[in-house]
Structure formats: C-alpha cells, structure tokens
C-alpha cells in the first residue's frame, strides 16, 4: 500500500505531495491535465526506464519519493533493505542526461532492484497494457501467477538449463583440441576482464552521485566561499540591527515582535555561516580521486557495452562465463557417458514439464471459470471464455512445453477464438479488469493501478466497472484514472488534477475533493461544462448516493 508520494520537477509536475487512502482512489480532470503523469512517476519510482524528457523544463533534476506499507515483502527482501515497522521508503532521481540514481530505505539501489521490489508493492495496468495480454507469453505468465506455479516453473527452467549444459558439453567433446582451447581462452579472458574490475553492487550509483561534485570542486569551493563571505557580512549586519531594535523596543514595547524576528534571523544567519564554512572545508580538489572515479565510471561503461546493460547483468554474464569455462576446462567424460547423462537430464525435464502442464491445466480451468464469472458482472450477457494450455512434448523450452492461449467470444452462436482476434478495445479493457480481479485473489500485492480501464465503455457498463473496482478495493488499495462519472462516484477518495501555468511553464496540480467539490466535479463530468447546472448537480448527487448503497 502506498502511504505517501512526493514528486518534484517530473514532466508537467512542479511539486506534488499525495497521501492516498486505503480504498478506491479516483483521479479525474480534463484531458491533458496530467493525470497519467502521476502514474508514470510512480512507475519511474519502481524501476521503469526513462529518459531526460521526464524533467520539467529548466529543472536540474527530477525526483520521486514514495513511502509504502510493505508487510507482504519476502523475508529475504525485507532483511536486505532493513525494513522496520513494515514501512519502506523508495527514492529515485534523474538528471538532464537521463542518468538516474535510486535508494531503498537510504541504501543505493540498482534499476533491477527497484523493479524487483516494485513487483511486490504495486501492480500496474496502463492504457496500453491490454495489448500485452494479446501475447502468448504474457498469457502464460499470468496463468502461472494465478496458479502460483513459480516453484514448478523454476524447476523446469533449471532442468532445461542442465540439459542445455550437457548438450554444450557433448558438442565440446566433438570439437577439435584446437577449437576447445581457443574457446576456453576466450571465456577465461572475458571472465578475467570482469573479475579484475572488482564490481560491487551499488558502486556505480554511488560514484555517479559523487562525480558532479568532484569535477566541479573548484567551482563549488569558490561559490561556497563567496556565499560564506556574504552570509558573514549579513550576519554581522543582522547583529547590529538587533542591537538597534533592542534599544528601540526599550523605548517602544510595541516593537518587541520585531526584536524576536530579528533575533531569529540573526541566529539563522550565524548557523548558516558556520555550515557554509564547513561545506567549503569539505570541498577539495583531489586529482587522484577525480582520476579514480572517472576511471571506474569508464570501466563500468566499457564492461556494460561488452557484457550487459547494467552491472547486475555484467555480473550475471561472469557467472555464465565461469560455468562455461569450468565445463570446458574439466571436460574428461567420453561421448557415450555424456550421451547417457543427457538422456537422463532430458527424461527429468520431460517429467517436470508434464507435471507443470498438469498443474497449468488445472489452474486454467479454475481461472477460466473465475474470469467468466467476473466478466458476466461487467455487462457481458452471452460471453464465453476459456484458457487453453496445449502441451507439445517436442517443443519443451525453459518455460515448459505448454502453448497457452486465451479464448473468447461475446457473440451467441460464434465459436471461441483467440482473444487477439475477437475482442474490441472496450471488451479488452473489461476482460483485463476481470483478469486483474481474479489475480488479486491469488496474490498479495497491496496496490493496483488502473489507467483508464473504462476506455471504450458506456455509462451502463461504466457503473458495473465502478462496482467491480469498489469491491476489489475492499481488500486492495486501488488507483483509477477515469473519465466516466459512473466510475468516479464509487471512489472512497477523489482527487482532481488540473493544469496551470507557473512562470510561463505548464504545471499540474492535484487536490483532494471534499463532498461539495466532488459533486461539482461529477456534475462537470456528466455535462462536460465547468459551470454545473442544477440538473447536473442533482444527477451527480444521485450517482453518489447510489454508489453507497
């Protein structure tokens, strides 16, 4: 559950502090006001990739910080990030060059670590996510998530990797000695290059945060010195002004408040002068340190270019190279023995893949029934839905031997066909909501985001969508961006997003609506007018009253 969200200089958001409620949080406003930007900022915080375009014009950096109730984190993750009192703070910044740095509970965190922990905190359903539902691999992953088959899927993946390793060893036996030696030298050279760098998790983020200060140390020293001198002069002037005001107040007691204020200003200036002096002493130009940090950053850049997109990927590549080198270096088995081992590994893989298929088939039947039940409550009168898990023992891969397909029809007399061929945009949005509702019962993710899940549906179906979201919000924290008043009426907290102009630059603002303001907003949504009519207000009140029944 998200307790607090702070956003600074992110796209059209200047500064925003949001404290959502525990139930259904509704976000409304005119098109283009910046509603989806809030969701984008939350996604950025939890590991989504971004570029320099997220920065507000003229800003030196963008920053998003969130505080979460994280009582569902796995024990290993909770221990890794020192989670205490069941709360977790995540922070991420981006600079004008698109570089980011992040922390979890104050400790530096890599992008992959943000994504990992974000997967336990918030489940996103964006405006275009239903397109991913058309992909077979997404359908398979959702089925596995629903059936809680992670352990079985992992076992198949490990067995597949073991069989592949034996296949590679068998291929290596067939190599000439020169080919094997050449390949072994390559693996060992690449591995030594990575190991020699002495990579440490979080080091890159720490050095990227330190580098701007190091390379600008002389400028920082000069500026802080000038600021200290000016502040010192101001502090002396404030002390003199304070003496004059004390003398003034001795004559005219009504001036006492001025003495108090000037005394506070003089104290603040003294403290500031001391801090500026300490800052200047801490800024020093060390050519050796500059060279060291620059060299490390260049080394990271070189390794990422050759071995992976980030440092965790480079370290993973090192593990792969080590395993391959060990396999070639210690290759003493003859061909017949390897063939026997490979046959046993394949038999084990086939057994695990078939067992996984049986579990998937059972989960598919249950998921089909749940989605059908949920879909019928979303305005589908004659809907039919099925999850098909077809097994092919000759096509076993790291995920098993199943080809998973979601089948759907909303028309009586028509056969079930793959979802990607039959569902309209509005139907896809409702199917996704039905799927998310079914999945929410199977997982422990505390917050779910729906960005215009009601796209393409009318008023009658919109009310059904609102009812469904409200029921889902009984056990989850829900964030919903909507243009339908029939959905907005079901919110337990209603936030209005509007865009203004500050210093010639567009800025989005968010405010939580009280009951009268909420009536006005829903009336606006009903009539499309900023100035609500009495009839519109009456209709808005009726919608709100009906949603509470």
Image: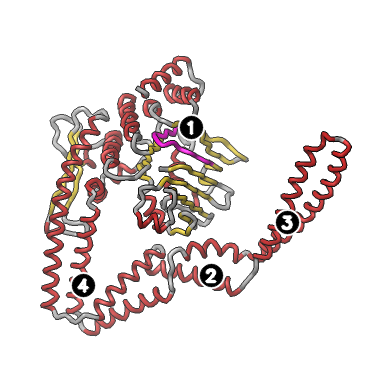
Image mark for residue 168: 4
Q: Is residue 296 above or below residue 14?
A: below
Could you tell me if the residues under marks 4 and 3 are in contact, i.e. CB atoms within 8 Å? Answer: no
Q: Which residue is mark 3?
A: 273
Q: Which residue is mark 1?
A: 496
Q: Is residue 57 above or below residue 548?
A: below
The figure's colour scheme reads secondary structure
Task: For mark 2, give the secondary structure.
Answer: helix
Q: Is residue 355 above or below residue 318?
A: above
Task: For mark 1, give the secondary structure.
Answer: strand
Whole-angstrom CA distance, mark 2 to mark 3, is 32 Å
Could you tell me if the residues under marks 2 and 3 are in contact, i.e. CB atoms within 8 Å? Answer: no
Q: Is residue 18 magenta?
A: yes
Quadrant of res 541: top left
Looking at the rendered image, the disc whose residue lies closer to the viewer, 4 or 1, is 1
Whole-angstrom CA distance, mark 2 to mark 4, is 40 Å
Q: Position of residue 146 (x, y in %)?
A: 24, 45
> Looking at the image, which is closer to me, 327 or 253?
253
Stretch of the chain drawn in magenta: 16-29
Mark with earlier residue (2, 3): 3
Q: Which residue is mark 2?
A: 294
Whole-angstrom CA distance, mark 2 to mark 1, is 46 Å
Mark with earlier residue (3, 1): 3
Looking at the rendered image, the disc whose residue lies closer to the viewer, 2 or 3, is 3
Could you tell me if the residues under marks 3 and 1 are in contact, i.e. CB atoms within 8 Å? Answer: no
Mark with earlier residue (2, 1): 2
């Amino acid at each position: 559950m998200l307790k607090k969200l702070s956003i600074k200089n992110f796209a059209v958001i200047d500064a925003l502090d949001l404290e959502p409620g525990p139930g259904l949080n509704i976000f409304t406003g005119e098109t283009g006001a910046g509603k989806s930007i809030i969701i984008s900022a939350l996604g950025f915080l939890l590991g989504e990739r971004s570029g320099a375009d997220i920065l507000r014009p003229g800003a030196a950096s963008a920053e998003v910080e969130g505080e979460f109730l994280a009582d569902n984190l796995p024990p290993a993750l909770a221990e890794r990030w020192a989670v205490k009192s069941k709360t977790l703070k995540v922070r991420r910044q981006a600079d004008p060059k698109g570089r980011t740095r992040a922390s979890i509970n104050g400790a530096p965190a890599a992008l992959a670590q943000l994504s990992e922990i974000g997967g336990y905190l918030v489940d996103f359903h964006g405006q275009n996510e239903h397109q991913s539902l058309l992909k077979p691999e997404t359908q398979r992953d959702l089925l596995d998530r629903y059936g809680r088959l992670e352990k079985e899927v992992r076992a198949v993946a490990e067995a597949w990797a073991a069989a592949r390793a034996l296949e590679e060893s068998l291929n290596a036996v067939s190599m000439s000695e020169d080919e094997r030696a050449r390949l072994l030298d390559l693996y060992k050279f690449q591995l030594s290059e990575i190991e020699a760098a002495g990579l440490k998790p979080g080091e890159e983020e720490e050095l990227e945060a330190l580098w701007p200060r190091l390379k600008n140390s002389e400028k920082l020293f000069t500026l802080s010195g000038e600021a200290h001198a000016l502040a010192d002069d101001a502090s002396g002037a404030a002390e003199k002004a304070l003496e004059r005001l004390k003398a003034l107040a001795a004559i005219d007691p009504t001036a006492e408040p001025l003495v108090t204020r000037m005394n506070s200003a003089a104290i603040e200036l003294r403290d500031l002068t001391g801090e500026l002096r300490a800052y200047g002493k801490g800024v020093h130009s060390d050519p050796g340190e500059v060279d060291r940090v620059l060299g490390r950053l260049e080394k990271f850049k070189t390794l990422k270019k050759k071995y992976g997109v980030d440092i965790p990927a480079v370290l993973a590549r090192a593990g792969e190279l080590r395993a391959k080198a060990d396999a070639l270096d210690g290759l003493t088995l003859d061909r017949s023995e390897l063939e026997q081992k490979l046959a046993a590994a394949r038999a084990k893989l086939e057994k695990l893949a078939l067992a996984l298929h049986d579990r998937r088939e059972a989960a598919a039947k249950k998921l089909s029934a749940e989605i059908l039940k949920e879909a019928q409550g979303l305005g589908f009168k004659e809907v039919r839905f099925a999850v098909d898990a077809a097994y092919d023992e000759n096509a076993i891969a790291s995920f098993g031997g199943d080809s998973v397909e979601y089948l759907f029809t909303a028309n009586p007399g028509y056969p079930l066909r793959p979802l990607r061929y039959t569902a309209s945009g509005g139907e896809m949005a409702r199917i996704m909501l039905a799927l998310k509702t079914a999945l929410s019962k199977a997982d422990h993710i505390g917050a779910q985001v729906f960005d215009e899940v009601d796209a393409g549906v009318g008023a009658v179906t919109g009310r059904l969508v609102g009812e469904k979201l409200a029921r889902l919000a009984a056990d989850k924290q829900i964030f919903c961006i909507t243009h339908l008043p029939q959905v907005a009426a079901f919110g337990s907290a209603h936030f209005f997003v509007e865009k203004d102009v500050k210093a010639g630059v567009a800025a989005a603002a968010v405010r939580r609506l009280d009951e009268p303001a909420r009536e006005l907003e829903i009336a606006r949504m009903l009539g499309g007018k900023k100035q609500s009519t009495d009839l519109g207000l009456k209709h808005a009140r009726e919608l709100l009253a009906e949603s509470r029944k």
